[in-house]
């Protein structure tokens, strides 16, 4: 990827997990920031980040990290965003931009917005990219390549600051769209949050089935179940927060899911093969659409190979 002129001077990453780490590596790859400073809650994470050189400088506190930063990225679980915003607020540089990468947008806007001082731009965003891995060693520079990042402006958002953030995400390899917060939360409930809940449930069900021994579940796990287990291995804190903060949209989609499930259950019981066949034909077309949009591969078994499996997306 071509190295571009830096878009920001100092960038502060609050949280040093999968998303922040990948941002740091992607920013470096394209030369998008003059300096990247990072911090995390635990001394262990900060030590690992320093050891592997994940950012240019690791500091002990969020207040220290944001000093003189032109861009501050909140990359902590959604439920922690408000407390972090309160901590950094007095230390933000006038004219700086604060953004976040949280998987839910309305709750983050409500938690963070009130802490943002006059003269600082708050521009929420959400990269639709991820894996089931977390922590400071899990990031990689190409995570956002050809993925979407949704920018969710709040009232009165500064245009120039928004354009700079857009340029950053594009420089990190992403396509950018702008979306309203409530719509974002509904779309993500359909495309990510409810599917994750279903995966967690399915793996939980298999775990409960004492008639199927653990070893059989693991030994004979075919693609369907195996893909569920990968998604259900995602970070428990992050996903707890997603469901607690995107409650309404998730419950709405879960309600619809349950109705559809009952319809299919009934079709199986009554032997309604036409209904099942029509339904599966419709869902197959959706899969084709995702491949045509370049968001997955048409290769068998999701293009898995030993090398690519660890990087298969399950972003929130
Ligand atoms: P991660 O790898 O688990 O990293 C989370 C980071 O947040 C860690 O550095 C952690 O510090 C810190 N943290 C955790 N709890 C905290 C608290 N209460 N106060 C302050 N810091 C805290 O997570 P991630 O996958 O990068 O996710 C970060 C954000 O991106 C989340 O809001 C998530 O919703 C969003 N997101 C995730 C994905 C995905 O697929 N993973 C995709 C898009 C967006 P310690 O290591 O010291 O505990």
Image: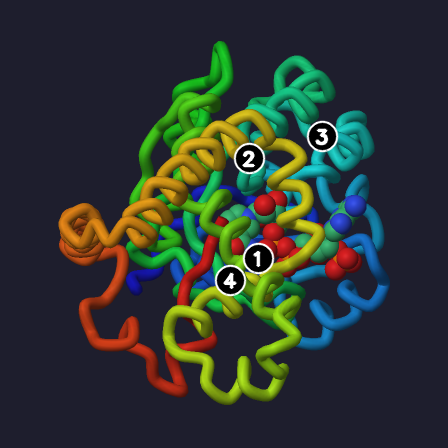
Whether tag 4 and tag 1 are in contact, CB under 8 A, the answer is: yes
Residue found at x 79% / y 28%: 86
Give the image quarter of residue 203: bottom right
Q: Answer with mark 4 or mark 1, whichever residue precedes in sequence.
A: 1
Task: Give the CA separation, mark 4 to mark 3.
Answer: 36 Å
Residue found at x 37% / y 30%: 163
- For label 1, the residue is 200
Q: In this view, does 270 lie to the left or right of 248?
A: left
Task: Give the CA separation, mark 3 to mark 1.
Answer: 39 Å
Above-or-below relation of 170 to 200: above
- Which corner quadrant holds the N terminus? bottom left
Q: Answer with mark 4 or mark 3, whichever residue precedes in sequence.
A: 3
Q: Where is residue 43 in the image (x, y as percent from the top left)?
A: 85, 63
Q: Answer with mark 1 or mark 2, whichever residue precedes in sequence.
A: 2
Residue found at x 48% / y 28%: 252
Secondary structure type for disc 2: loop
Q: In this view, does 42 lie to the left or right of 135?
A: right
Secondary structure type for disc 1: helix
Q: Tag on residue 157?
A: none
Pointer 2 residue Cβ closer than 8 Å to ligand 1: yes
Q: Answer with mark 3 or mark 2, whichever residue precedes in sequence.
A: 3
Q: Which residue lies furthest to the top in this view?
A: 156
Front residue of 164 and 136: 136
Q: Answer with mark 4 or mark 2, whichever residue precedes in sequence.
A: 2
């Amino acid at each position: 990827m071509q190295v571009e002129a830096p878009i920001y001077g100092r960038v502060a990453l609050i949280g040093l997990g999968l998303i922040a780490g990948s941002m740091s590596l992607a920013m470096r790859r394209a030369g998008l920031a003059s300096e990247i400073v990072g911090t995390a809650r635990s001394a262990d994470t900060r030590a690992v980040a320093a050891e592997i050189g994940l950012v240019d400088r690791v500091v002990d506190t969020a207040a220290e990290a944001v000093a003189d930063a032109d861009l501050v990225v909140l990359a902590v679980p959604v439920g922690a965003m408000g407390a972090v915003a309160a901590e950094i607020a007095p230390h933000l540089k006038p004219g700086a931009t604060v953004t976040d990468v949280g998987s839910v947008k309305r709750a983050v806007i409500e938690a963070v917005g009130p802490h943002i001082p006059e003269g600082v731009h708050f521009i929420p965003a959400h990269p639709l990219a991820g894996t089931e891995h977390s922590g400071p060693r899990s990031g990689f520079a190409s995570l956002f390549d050809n993925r979407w990042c949704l920018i969710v402006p709040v009232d009165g958002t500064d245009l120039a600051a928004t354009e700079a953030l857009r340029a950053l995400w594009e420089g990190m390899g992403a396509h950018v769209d702008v979306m309203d917060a409530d719509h974002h939360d509904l779309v993500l409930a359909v495309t990510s949050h409810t599917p994750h809940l279903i995966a967690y449930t399915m793996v939980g069900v298999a775990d409960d089935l004492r008639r199927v021994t653990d070893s059989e579940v693991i030994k004979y796990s075919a693609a369907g179940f195996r893909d569920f287990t990968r998604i259900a291995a995602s970070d428990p804190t992050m996903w707890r927060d997603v469901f607690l903060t995107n409650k309404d949209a998730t419950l709405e989609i879960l309600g619809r899911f349950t109705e559809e499930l009952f319809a299919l259950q009934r079709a199986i019981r009554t032997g309604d093969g036409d209904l099942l066949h029509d339904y599966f034909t419709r869902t197959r077309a959706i899969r084709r659409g995702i491949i045509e949009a370049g968001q997955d591969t048409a290769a068998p078994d999701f293009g898995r190979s030993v090398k690519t499996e660890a990087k298969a997306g399950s972003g929130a």
